Image (tube, helix red, strand yellow):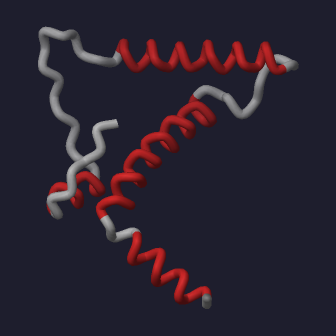
Amino acid sequence: MRRADLQVRARSEQQTPEWKARYAVRSGVEGTINEFAHGHGMRHCRYRGLPRTHLQHALTAIAVIIERLSDLAPAEEVPSARPPTAFQTYLDHHGIPRSKS
C-alpha cells in the first residue's frame, strides 16, 4: 500500500466517534505524564536502584494527587465550570458523547 493511501485511510479513521473517544482518553493520560516529566522532575531520579526509584515515583504520584485534591473547592460550594476545550466543543457540536474518564 502506498504511503498516500495509508495517510488517507488514517485520516478517515480519525473522523469516527470511536477513534475520537479513544484519543480523548489518550490525551488525558499524555497530559498527566507530561505533568510528571516536566512539572515534577521525573526525568531524573535522585536514587539508584529500582526499589528506591519506584518509591520516589510512588511518593511523587501521591503528592500530585494531594496537590490536585487541595485545589478542589469545598463540598458546600459549587465549583465554577471550566470553559470547554476546542475538542470538547467539537464533540458537543457533532453530538458525540464525551468519555467519562
Q: Is residue 79 above or below residue 20?
A: above
Q: Residue furthest right?
A: 48
State the image coordinates of residue 93 (x, y, percent, origin top left). Answer: 15, 61
Q: Left or right of 92: which side holds 4? A: right
82 or 19, which is in the foreground?
A: 19
Q: Quadrant of residue 73?
A: top left
Q: Please tell me how many numbered marks the rendered image carries.
A: 0
Q: Is residue 40 left or right of residue 48?
A: left
Question: On the rendered structure, is 54 left or right of 76?
Answer: right
Picture quarter with the N terminus: bottom right
Q: Is residue 61 above or below residue 82?
A: above
The answer to whether 32 is drawn above or below residue 15 in the figure is: above
- In the rendered image, the quadrant that contains the C terminus is top left
Residue at image point 32% right, 67% down: 16
x and y percent of residue 54 in the render? 72, 19
Q: Residue at x 34, y 18 (%)?
A: 71
Q: Quadrant of residue 74?
A: top left
Q: Is residue 26 left or right of residue 85?
A: right
Identify the residue shown where x is 40% and y is 20%: 68
| Residue 97 place in picture, x, y as percent | 21, 51
Location of residue 3 with respect to 67 vertically, above or below: below
Tell which of 27 and 44 is nearer to you: 27
x, y percentage for residue 61?
56, 20
In-front residue for pair 50/1: 1
Question: Residue at the spot x=50%, y=19% of the render?
Answer: 64
